[in-house]
Image (cartoon, coloured by chain):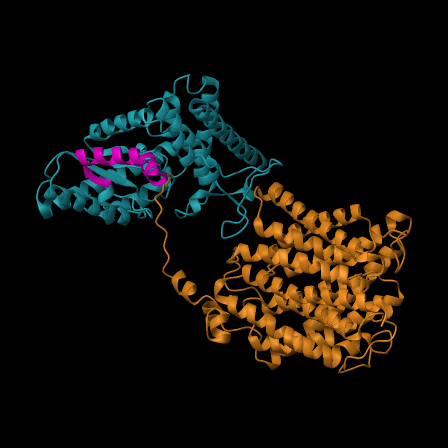
Chain colours: A orange, B cyan
Amino acid sequence: MDTLFLMNSLWVMVAAVLVILMLGGFILLETGSTRMKNAGHIAGKTILTFGISSVVFWAVGYGLIFGAGNALIGFSDFFYSGYDIEGLSLSGAVFFLFQLAFAGISLTIAFGGFAERAKLGAYLVFAILFSVIVYPPIAHWIWGGGWLAEHGKQDFAGSTVVHLTGAMAAFAATLILKPRIGKYNKDGSANNLAGHNQVFTALSVLILWVGWFGFNAGSTVSVDGAFFGFVALNTNLAAGAGVIAAMIISWIVMGKADVPMMLNGALAGLVAITASCAFVDTWAAVLIGFIAGFLVFYSIRFFESKGIDDPIAALSVHGAAGVWGTLSTGLFATPELATVGEPGLFYGGGLHQLGVQALGVVSSGAFAFIVSFILLTIMKAVMNGLRVTEEEEIIGLDMSEHGSYGYPEMVKAEKTTISSEPKLNA
Amino acid sequence: MTSYLEIRRFRDDQIIWVSRNHLQLNQLHDEIIHRVITVSVKEIEERYGPLPCPFTFFMMGSAGRFEQSVWSDQDHGIIYQQQGTEINDHFLALGKEISHGLQLAGYEYCDGAVMASNPLWCKSLSEWRRQLANWSIDSNWQSIRQLLIFIDGRSLYGEASFLENLKIEVYQTIKNENLLKKVLDNTLHLKKGIGVLGQILVETHGPHSGSLNIKEKALFPYVNAIRLLAIKGNILETSTLSRLKKLPEIELPIIKKEIYKQQFLKLLNLRLSLSKPDNYENSHYLPVASLSKKQKEEVKEILKNGAALYRYVRNLVEKENY
């Protein structure tokens, strides 16, 4: 067996492990950004739905994406048995596992829109439906030789395929589930249902940041020329620029360096650079991340002001930043690096590539949103509602869906806490 | 008037007429509180016999500073002349009765229990002297805060000299023990009311979204900074405006004094005329979107000057302490 084959396999295996570990990041992100009474539920369901997603991907997901088919869908290679895949210079099983991890991440993002109010049953059913009907067509269009791939769409590691798809499903879910109890006042003003642990949220960003080296740099699926190093560098720069930009804009507009906002800035930078990490220069990576940091700030405020309750900012971090990232290669892709498609607007490519990117965003985004919306509407009718009862929501999903609290002592103690600090300026 | 509920009716009848005038509003509050105390004293004397010795009842917080808005909570204490178990019980009963009466008359209880119904704030002259000395010696965050609350005390009933003498002693101790720096650390955390682009920083979440928290972002910088200068200048007055008026040139140059006086007066009146004072909570918020362009500029000026005053006082104290 030749060395390159082994090296490629080893590198992509490492990357797959990193991507799967990103689920740990999502567990901390989602629990940290929400309330204690739902923490056990959120952590547990993330593992559970990844399990479902894995099995579904093995049975049909992979075949629908990478199987032989037409421009719209693949249709072979179901129930993959571990054989090597023609035309790939790495282990077929490793490649399969890597792709499986991506499908799991996209699903986890979609579930951000369910947080703190959906029944466990809704998670189970939608995990299957999303993994069969929503994710595979889009992944096939762009990565599986479908119509957008033929078109020259650039999405190196999945700003569109993974992040925008997940975010659009999350969007459909937030619209159908409606805001959490207590999020909005009668006059339409929003309350801050603050997450219970900023340390978790910060740690989640670090885990995701590191995991993203698997996500992006691993998407080289080869060690050839050690190009993965360059991709990782761009990834890191965009994340750094995103956190700086979000801090600056939050300080300018709100007068404070808001911690959740800074953290979302880092994630937005990562999401944005996901499409373009292999196609742009380092300075462009900084700029792309920086703009993503600004964008996520305004996007979060926009959705909140429109009465759309998005507990972990999935629409903004993965949606808005995913759109921006996908479009960014249409501006910044360099002639040397654009191995797929054409160079961007700023490199003499004109509007061609930007148009291709925009078409990809619109068609993929619309497909993910519409199909998710229809599926969830049907589920709502069949399952007698997707949301837990008011009482269940108030006692928390830990108790209502699983019968025990993630923080048994703390949730009980919360009710008896009082403050008694003397006031000076009453 | 013989009952608290009658006083409440009197309050409800009268207050709408003065709710937009700072001076008259606070005079009315004083009168209502005075009436409550009179009823309480009578009630206690009927129940337990005549009060055993002279005393004074004093208000603190915004009432002490003569800066109440339409709704306000209660912060108060009692100082009585002689010490003794029965005497203590007698005045504590009075404190409880007044607190109860004020609540019926429309003044919410104080969350921090700064009330004469709490033995901490209802003591004989000698016990008060000992407590104030202990607060100065401890000089931790909580005890300094309690000293500052006490400094805003204003006598409304009885022997005002009890309070005045204690306050003079407190001022002296603060200076002797070099506590001004601690006072500064205790109160001068500035909540920014104005952003780097010159915009007013409003609440982004909750029922007061879009409103400016005028209490914390506009009033506090003035009140806290001027209180500190008053301690430095040995001024016993409690209202921010009268403290300002009495400040010697050496503490605050006359030209600045005039600016801050005007700004603070404008702020008090803006608060009364523009916030929706339907309850205690709402009276602290100014809906910025409904302000005219001119009013917005005024608010910005007030915020900027408050921040400037804050910086001035901080530099002044820090310079002296290093």
Residue B139: in sight, yes or no?
Answer: yes
Q: Position of residue A128 (x, y in %)?
A: 67, 78
Give the magenta range.
B121-148
Which image quadrant for residue A395?
bottom left
Q: Which is nearer the eye, B231 or A10? A: A10
**Quadrant of image for the N terminus of chain A:** bottom right
Magenta stretch containing residue A121, yes or no? no
Q: Residue at x 79, y 77 (%)?
A: A64
Q: Residue at x 45, y 22 (%)?
A: B257
Q: Which is nearer the eye, A26 or B260? A: A26
Q: Which is nearer the eye, A337 or B156? A: A337
| Majority secondary structure in the magenta region | helix
- The answer to whether A33 appears left or right of B14 in the picture is right
- The answer to whether A316 appears left or right of B282 in the picture is right
Which image quadrant for residue B159?
top left
Magenta stretch containing residue B125, yes or no? yes
Q: Position of residue A56 (x, y in %)?
A: 70, 79
